Image (tube, rainbow, N blue to C red):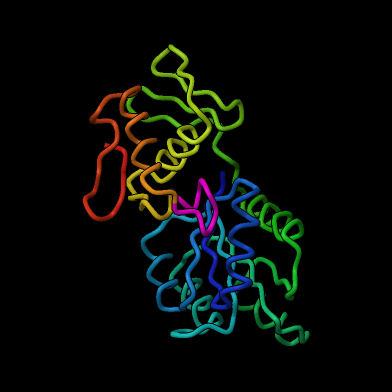
Amino acid sequence: MLSLLLIEDDPILGQGMQIGLQQRDFLVEWVKDGLVARRQLRHGNFDCVLLDLQLPGMDGEQLLREWRKSGNTVPVLIITARDAISDRVSGLDDGADDYVVKPVSIDELVARVRAVYRRKGGAPVSELKHAGVTLDPIGHTVRLREAEVALPSAEFKILQTLMEHGRRVSTREYLERTLYGYDGARSNTIEVHIHGLRAKFGKSFIKTVRGVGYILA
């Protein structure tokens, strides 16, 4: 499951892209401001960035140039309404890996994300491991040491997200969006699923970061 940083200030487009990509099993963090995106990319671990050019706070071109100047090689896919040849040339020269003009279908967007990720030499992790737990995202299985553990789909998805995030905290809101989409707050269901995972793997397996979210201990 690839982790994407979506930088788009249009609420309708951003929501549509986030939901569409999540439905295709991507982890999507969506920010609407260039300065917030700058901070997130500095501290986060993303497989690909989807970058709009016209942003509040700090424009996309400036962000891209700064990232590349600092040596950051994360694949960047520009998604913009600017369709002039000169804009395309400028974006690619600044370090973008691909350039897409809006509107773009989710299916094409998914294909382009996978293509730029492959060109960068990336490969999806076949198995995730932590503290004796092994998760196979392709086979959809989980083992505790050598014993297979049956998980409901929601618990599996939360565990996969936590294991992929490693030492990054997963917020409650992020886990909700991963399970239910953008408008998916579901009362205390995240806590119920976390309780279920702790019952199977131990109370200390998942740590609660008070007021923030959860992280593997």
| Residue shown at 46% from the left, 84% from the top | 58
Q: Viewed as shown, does residue 1 lie left or right of 37?
A: right
| Residue shown at 53% from the left, 83% from the top | 55
Residue 215: where, in percent of width, then height? 31, 43
Residue 144: where, in percent of width, then height? 40, 18
Quadrant of the image occupied by residue 143: top left
Magenta stretch contains residue 98 = no
Extreme residue toward the top, this view: 147
Extreme residue toward the front, this view: 187
| Residue shown at 36% from the left, 51% from the top | 172
Quadrant of the image occupied by residue 158: top left
Quadrant location, the C terminus? top left
Q: Viewed as shown, does residue 140 lie left or right of 163?
A: right
| Residue shown at 77% from the left, 87% from the top | 84
Q: Viewed as shown, does residue 90 lie left or right of 74?
A: right
Tell me: residue 174, above or below residue 153: below
- Label count reads 0
Residue 212: where, in percent of width, then height? 28, 55
Quadrant location, the N terminus? top right
Residue 208: where, in percent of width, then height? 25, 43
Magenta stretch contains residue 184 = yes
Q: Viewed as shown, does residue 147 lie left or right of 118?
A: left
Tell me: residue 26, above or below residue 155: below
Q: Which residues are magenta?
A: 176-185
Tell me: residue 33, above or below residue 86: above
